[in-house]
Amino acid sequence: MGGSTSDTPHSIACANGNIVVSILDFFSHPEYAKFDGFGNQQSGWSVDTSEPSVWPLQLTANGNSVYSLATLLDDGIGAGGSYLGFWKQIYNCQ
């Protein structure tokens, strides 16, 4: 499907049958693509370079919106750091 991942891909189906897939590229940047209900790719892979994620992204749908949960390493706390998670809207299913 044109994307390469360093970890497990995740997907979510919208109420209208479209599917959103998330992967982590080899630089730990999240990438997203849209597919129709038959698995045909409807968009190219969009790369989010704002923050690298520590683990694969989890996806959830709420109404007509798809959100991803990214986990980031917070280097500002202690020697080992701590982890921060945040939700981000990535796709509108309409």
Image (cartoon, rainbow, N blue to C red):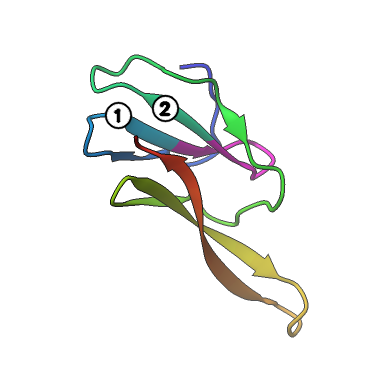
Callout 1 amino acid = Asn
Q: Nearer the viewer, residue 50 or 74?
A: 50
Contact, CB < 8 Å: mark 2 with mark 1? yes
Q: Name the residue rendered at 59%, 31% in the picture.
A: 46
Residue 39 placement (x, y as % from top left): 30, 18
Picture quarter containing residue 53? bottom right
State the extent of the magenta-drawn residues as a range.
22-31
Q: Name the residue rendered at 41%, 40% in the picture.
A: 92
The label number, if any, that marks residue 7 in the structure image: none
Q: Is residue 25 magenta?
A: yes
Q: Say if residue 50 shows up in the picture.
A: yes
Q: Earlier in the sequence, mark 2 or mark 1?
A: 1
Q: Quadrant of the C terminus?
A: top left
Picture quarter containing residue 41? top left
Q: Residue furthest bottom?
A: 78
What is the distance, in whole Å, between disc 2 and disc 1 at their CAs? 7 Å
Q: Say if residue 8 shows up in the picture.
A: no
Residue 71 placement (x, y as % from top left): 55, 62
Q: Quadrant of the N terminus?
A: top left
Residue 29 placement (x, y as % from top left): 64, 43
Callout 2 amino acid = Lys
Q: Nearer the viewer, residue 71 or 8?
A: 71
| Residue bearing mark 2 | 34
Q: Residue furthest front?
A: 94
The label number, if any, that marks residue 18 in the structure image: 1
Q: Name the residue rendered at 32%, 45% in the picture.
A: 64
